[in-house]
Image (cartoon, rainbow, N blue to C red):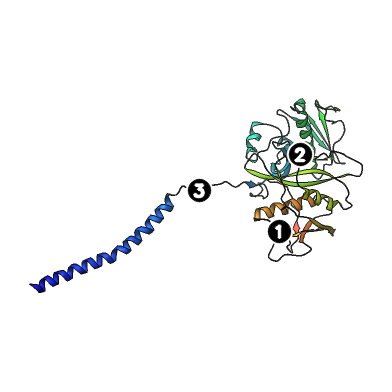
């Protein structure tokens, strides 16, 4: 009887022992399950949509089209060059380019994602277009071309037209006619009586102007009202430089004018230490402050601002960037050993 009691007691202890040993494993398993559940139950972090930029061509060029630069305007009345694929069609590529800037609900909806606006009045019709051997383009519009709402819009529209047409290699100047007639001034005073050349796009007017000042074009990035960022050309007035390349790069480093939403791509304190152009290559040297960037996106924006600005000079086809006169190991652009091509287009939108 005692032996049976001992046996029964021994079996009971074994059961208790195994039960007790299983509890830590069960508890551990429950612990991890609870941690997982706690992580899963955390509120999802709101997804931040990063802005896209109009820097790269994402689609192959469709057949029967031509890559053409059109000039739109943004909410701050800055003209913005945008490469579009324009259908060649029967009307000619120059006419098609002009049509691509005329206000219509379809065009407005098409370019809405980039936050830009058409530059020519609604109802504008091209009556005729002739390009002469000397590079003069004569464009005849109907009277709706005169229907701009403001003096600024009128001046921007004419400038957008001239810059767009001057982008064709066989066009140097543009003569505007209305219903077959040449007129001296438009309703808000824009002079169109003689052939026009592309000049002073997005001019930043100085407080004082003298004969020793010269103009340079520089490029800044901007995040507009749409989903994209884009580069904007500014014409700045400078003085005291004998080297026009140095003048342009110094003006670029100076930063944009306020209240236009433009970004200075350079880190604070970056200085231009020198610039020379030899055999089509611009060798530009910056202080090491230029390395104080936090992302590849910032670096690309800075490199594009540099190359676009220097690309305004016909003598420059490539750029090499130095830092304190030195090359930097394991870099591609800033301080790298490679020569950087000048971008063919400023912005792209297909």
Q: Which mark is residue 275?
A: none
Q: Nearer the viewer, mark 3 or mark 2?
A: 3
Residue lying furthest bottom: 3
Q: Nearer the viewer, residue 190 or 272?
A: 272
- Element at badge 2? helix
| Image: 86 above or below 293 | above
Q: What residue sits right under mark 2 in the picture?
A: 94
| Image: 296 above or below 127 | below
Residue at screen point 18% across, 67% down: 12
Spatial separation of the CA atoms under disc 1 and disc 3: 32 Å
- Element at badge 3? loop
Residue 140 figure quarter:
top right
Counting from the top left corner in percent of width and height, residue 343 is at 74, 52
Mark 1 or mark 3: which comes first in sequence? 3
Spatial separation of the CA atoms under disc 2 and disc 1: 43 Å
Counting from the top left corner in percent of width and height, residue 38 is at 41, 52
Mark 2 or mark 1: which comes first in sequence? 2
Q: What residue sits right under mark 3 in the picture?
A: 45
- 325 lies left or right of 20: right
Quadrant location, the C terminus: top right
Mark 3 or mark 2: which comes first in sequence? 3
Q: What residue sits right under mark 1 in the picture?
A: 291
């Amino acid at each position: 009887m005692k032996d049976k009691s001992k046996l029964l007691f021994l079996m009971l202890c074994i059961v208790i022992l195994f039960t007790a040993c299983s509890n830590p494993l069960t508890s551990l398993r429950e612990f991890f399950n609870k941690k997982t559940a706690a992580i899963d139950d955390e509120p999802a972090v709101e997804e931040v949509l990063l802005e896209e930029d109009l820097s790269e061509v994402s689609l192959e060029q469709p057949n029967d089209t031509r890559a053409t630069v059109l000039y739109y305007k943004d909410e701050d009345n800055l003209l913005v060059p945008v490469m579009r694929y324009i259908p060649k069609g029967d009307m000619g590529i120059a006419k098609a380019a002009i049509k691509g800037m005329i206000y219509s609900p379809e065009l407005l909806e098409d370019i809405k994602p980039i936050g830009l606006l058409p530059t020519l009045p609604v109802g504008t019709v091209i009556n005729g277009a002739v390009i002469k051997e000397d590079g003069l383009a004569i464009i005849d519009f109907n009277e709706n071309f005169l229907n701009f709402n403001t003096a600024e819009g009128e001046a921007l529209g004419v400038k957008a037209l001239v810059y767009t047409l001057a982008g064709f290699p066989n066009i140097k100047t543009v003569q505007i006619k209305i219903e077959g007639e040449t007129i001296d001034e438009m309703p808000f005073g824009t002079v169109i009586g003689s052939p026009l050349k592309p000049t002073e796009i997005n001019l930043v007017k100085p407080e004082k102007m003298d004969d020793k000042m010269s103009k340079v074009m520089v490029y800044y990035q901007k995040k507009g009202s749409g989903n994209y960022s884009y580069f904007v050309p500014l014409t700045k007035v400078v003085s005291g430089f004998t080297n026009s390349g140095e003048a342009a790069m110094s003006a670029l480093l100076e930063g944009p004018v306020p209240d236009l939403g433009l970004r200075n791509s350079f880190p604070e304190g970056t200085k231009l230490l020198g610039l020379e152009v030899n055999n089509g290559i611009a060798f530009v040297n910056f202080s090491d402050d230029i390395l104080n960037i936090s992302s590849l996106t910032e670096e690309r924006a800075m490199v594009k601002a540099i190359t676009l600005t220097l690309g305004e000079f016909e003598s420059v086809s490539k750029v090499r960037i130095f830092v304190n006169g030195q090359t930097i190991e394991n870099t591609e652009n800033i301080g790298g050993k490679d020569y950087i091509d000048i971008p063919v287009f400023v912005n792209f939108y297909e």
